[in-house]
Image (cartoon, rainbow, N blue to C red):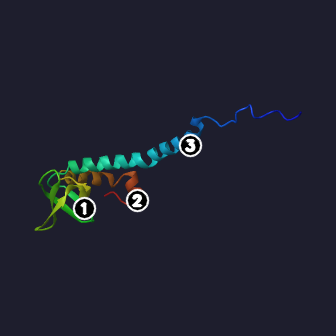
Amino acid sequence: MLISPAYAQSGGGGDMLTGLLPIILIFVVFYFLLIRPQQKKAKAHRELVAALRRGDRVVTAGGIMGVVARVSNEHEVLVEIAEGVRVRMVRSQITDVLSKPGQAQAAAPAAQAGAGSLLGGLFGRRGN
């Protein structure tokens, strides 16, 4: 008899870890490519909204730019979008802070100093 009896041997089904390894790997990749960056972005937005102060120049979710006139409570701000036009908004709808009140004065001398630099020359700015 040339054919050995195969009924006594178990089939090589592989262990359970080998079958689950690709699925675990996919979850790890999804976490680092999708979930973690989204959590970082949400945390940065929460910090931005928590740091809103009177006088901040902001952009809303609708694209309207204005100045924070008053921070009413933890959920609401009053944004002045034009002279005499104030809008109550939910804080979470503020998407970006363009500048803080003291930032504008500090940025002007830095911009003048950088105009004659190497990068300023590369991008078309000429020193005086």
CA gap between label 3 and label 2 equals: 49 Å
Element at label 3: helix
Disc 2 marks which amino acid?
Answer: Phe
Foreground tag (3 vs 1): 3
Q: Against 122, is 81 above or below?
A: below
- Looking at the image, is mark 3 or mark 2 earlier in the sequence? 3
Disc 3 marks which amino acid?
Answer: Pro
**Which residue carries the number 3 mark?**
22
- Looking at the image, is mark 1 or mark 2 earlier in the sequence? 1
**Which residue carries the number 2 mark?**
123
- Which residue is at 18% across, 50% downward? 102
Do residues under tags 3 and 1 come within 8 Å of each other at their CB atoms?
no
- Which residue is at 73% across, 32% downward? 9
Quadrant in the picture for the C terminus: bottom left
| CA neighbours of label 3 inside 10 A, class few (<14), some (14 to 19), many (20+) | few
Q: Nearer the viewer, residue 83 or 3?
A: 3
**Which residue carries the number 1 mark?**
60
CA gap between label 3 and label 1 equals: 42 Å
Disc 1 marks which amino acid?
Answer: Thr
Compared across the picture, whether 14 is left or right of 31 comes to right
Q: Nearer the viewer, residue 107 or 9?
A: 9
Foreground tag (3 vs 2): 3
